[in-house]
Image (spheres, helix red, strand yellow):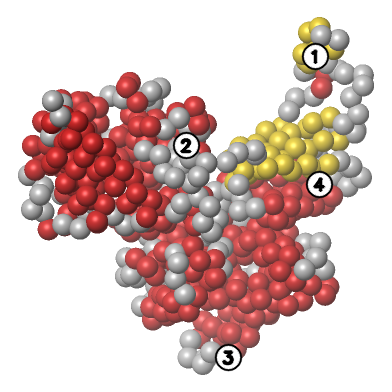
């Protein structure tokens, strides 16, 4: 079963060097274990853009987005046997944030891919 | 939460930690069978205690501590003939050989995974033993899960694993690493196991126990592990390509009623293009590494011809026929020749295909193989020889392995019978 992990935060800061190193090691382990298929950190909101449909009209808005409450920082795609494994994996990932970037608050949302 | 739910949750946590647990233990103890035993003991301890205490905040550390404690017990209990056991036990107690859990994140598990896979798939072990051990040690499947996946009793699998570990220990193979040329030689016994697991899962029909088709994912995972830790092995890339490309058709292979749909009749819009792309990339890497003529790379190239065709009509059958000819030169196999006949039949016409099939009619290996009369029936039907086609399809139905295939073949026999009657009616 394929899962996407999406990390969001209300106060996005880049990861500390310690967190980056810890995440890099975890990623390496998960790739070598054949479970993580893809991952990426996203550039800050200010560099992005949005294409919206409001009142039947398409419009383009450049970042930063004033109304944004939760900002997506990054994502990962895993192939795992089921939701319980995905939860265990996500918990471990967030524990790294707790250990190496104390004070940070955020969410790791995990959702299975829709499919057969 | 029911007991079963709690167990499922605990098993899931253990499964996430399992790769690092087993690789660290194997490295510490320099003994793969013992490391495997300890990860199982850690799991049992977790299943026993966590329902009451709750899942610890750092489950990996808990499991490692538990495993370490059991390791010390094991080392003390074993007869102290080996000086090194004594020293190892001493070191562990002094926490000198043992990195602490947090810094264990430093360990590159790549080397250890390599060692694990090659140990589990040692050619000394039977193929069944290698399969069970690989699913256990690399994929973290329990005995019950492996048994369900292969439709065998738990006790059979349990026995296979116990015997396999004993064989490894007694042969002094508890901790060795093949290098360089030896690795390439040993690789085939690993790939064989991975492909066996994939095919077992691939053959399982949807709607059956979900665990069986899940074998495809376990095999894909092992394939990814292999290409990640042995990146210069072309056949590892070839096998991964073959599996990804075959798995890409999963959504299109059965209809709503669970009936199988032949590849040429499948809705290609349902083929997973990302999986196809990964398969093509792996195939490309196999070619870059000079592995174009490999056993798995050739099979992958054949499947790639299908995957790359937008519709069945666009299939490059000539290329497929040529690839089968290359494959036949690598491995003498009447089944490969039969597949070549199908491709030649599509590329050059049914008569050309039939002449190859007819040369296979006395092959002892194909005597009970339902696809031989099935292919023959198809070619005869295309040549308008309907009565002979009917007989061939009936023969195939009698040999077919499962109900669905039998039904499909009987239907074709009936169609051929109708065609025979209508063609004789003036």
Residue B34, horizontal then vertical, whole percent: 53, 76
Residue A93, horizontal then vertical, whole percent: 74, 49
Q: Chain of mark 1?
A: A
Which residue corresponds to the image point at 19% horizontal and 43% vertical from the top-left? B390
- Compute the Cα span from label 4 to label 3: 41 Å
Q: Chain of mark 4?
A: A
Say which residue label 3 marks: B77
Sequence-wise, the earlier of marks 2 and 3 is 3
- Asked if marks 1 and 3 fall on the same chain, the answer is no
**SS category of the residue bearing label 3:** helix
Q: Is residue B324 above or below residue B408?
A: above
Residue B313 appears in the figure: yes
Q: Is residue B82 above or below residue B375?
A: below
Say which residue label 2 marks: B252
**Horizontal side of residue B43 vs B186, given as left or right:** right
- Compute the Cα span from label 2 to label 1: 34 Å
Q: Is residue B212 above or below residue B125?
A: above
Say which residue label 1 marks: A52
For residue A7, what is the image quadrant?
A: top right
Q: Are marks 1 and 3 in contact (CB under 8 Å)?
A: no
In the depicted view, which residue is nearer to us: B212 or B188?
Answer: B212
Q: Nearer the viewer, mark 2 or mark 3?
A: 2
Q: Is residue B175 above or below residue A51?
A: below
Sequence-wise, the earlier of marks 4 and 1 is 1
Say which residue label 4 marks: A97
For residue B398, what is the image quadrant?
A: bottom left
Which residue corresponds to the image point at 74% horizontal and 34% vertical from the top-left? A74
Q: Quadrant of the N terminus of chain B?
A: bottom right
């Amino acid at each position: 079963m394929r899962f996407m992990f999406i990390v969001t935060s209300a106060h996005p800061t880049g990861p500390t060097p310690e967190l980056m190193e810890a995440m890099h090691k975890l990623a390496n382990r998960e790739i070598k274990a054949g479970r993580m298929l893809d991952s990426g950190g996203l550039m800050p909101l200010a560099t992005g853009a949005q294409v919206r449909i409001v009142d039947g009209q398409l419009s383009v808005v450049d970042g930063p987005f004033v109304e944004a409450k939760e900002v997506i920082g990054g994502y990962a795609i895993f192939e795992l046997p089921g939701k319980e494994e995905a939860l265990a994996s996500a918990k471990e990932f967030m524990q790294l944030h707790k250990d190496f970037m104390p004070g940070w608050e955020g969410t790791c949302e995990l959702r299975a891919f829709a499919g057969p | 939460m029911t007991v079963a739910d709690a167990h499922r949750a605990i098993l899931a946590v253990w499964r996430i930690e399992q790769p690092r647990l087993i690789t660290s233990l194997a490295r510490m103890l320099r003994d793969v069978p013992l490391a495997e035993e300890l990860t199982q003991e850690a799991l049992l301890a977790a299943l026993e205690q966590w329902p009451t205490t709750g899942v610890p905040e750092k489950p990996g550390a808990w499991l490692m501590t538990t495993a370490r404690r059991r390791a010390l017990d094991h080392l003390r209990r074993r007869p102290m003939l080996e000086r090194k056991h004594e020293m190892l036990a001493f070191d562990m107690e002094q926490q000198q050989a043992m990195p602490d859990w947090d810094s264990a994140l430093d360990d590159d598990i790549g080397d250890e995974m390599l060692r694990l896979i090659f140990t589990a798939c040692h050619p000394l072990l039977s193929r069944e033993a290698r399969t069970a051990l690989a699913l256990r040690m690399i994929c973290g499947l329990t005995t019950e899960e492996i048994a369900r996946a292969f439709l065998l009793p738990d006790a059979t699998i349990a026995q296979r694993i116990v015997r396999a570990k004993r064989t490894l220990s007694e042969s002094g193979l508890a901790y060795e690493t093949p290098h360089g040329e030896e690795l390439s030689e040993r690789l085939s016994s690993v790939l064989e196991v991975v492909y066996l697991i994939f095919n077992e899962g691939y053959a399982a029909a949807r709607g059956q126990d979900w665990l069986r088709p899940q074998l495809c994912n376990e095999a894909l995972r092992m394939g990814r592990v292999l290409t990640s830790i042995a990146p210069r092995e072309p056949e590892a890339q070839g096998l991964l390509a073959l599996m990804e490309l075959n798995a890409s058709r999963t959504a299109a292979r059965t209809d709503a009623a669970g009936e199988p749909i032949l590849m040429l009749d499948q809705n290609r819009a349902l083929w997973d293009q990302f999986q196809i792309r990964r398969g093509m990339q792996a195939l490309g890497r196999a070619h870059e590494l000079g592995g174009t003529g490999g056993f798995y790379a050739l099979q992958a190239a054949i499947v790639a011809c299908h995957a790359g065709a937008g519709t069945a009509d666009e299939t490059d059958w000539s290329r497929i026929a040529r690839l089968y000819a290359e494959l036949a030169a690598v491995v003498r196999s009447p089944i490969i020749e039969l597949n070549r006949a199908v491709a030649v039949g599509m590329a050059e016409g049914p008569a050309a295909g039939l002449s190859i099939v007819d040369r296979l009619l006395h092959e002892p290996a194909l005597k009970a193989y339902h696809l031989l009369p099935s292919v023959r029936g198809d070619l005869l039907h295309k040549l308008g020889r309907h009565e002979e086609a009917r007989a061939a399809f009936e023969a195939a139905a009698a040999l077919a392995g499962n109900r669905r295939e039998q039904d499909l073949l009987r239907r074709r026999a009936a169609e051929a019978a109708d065609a025979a009657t209508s063609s004789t009616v003036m």
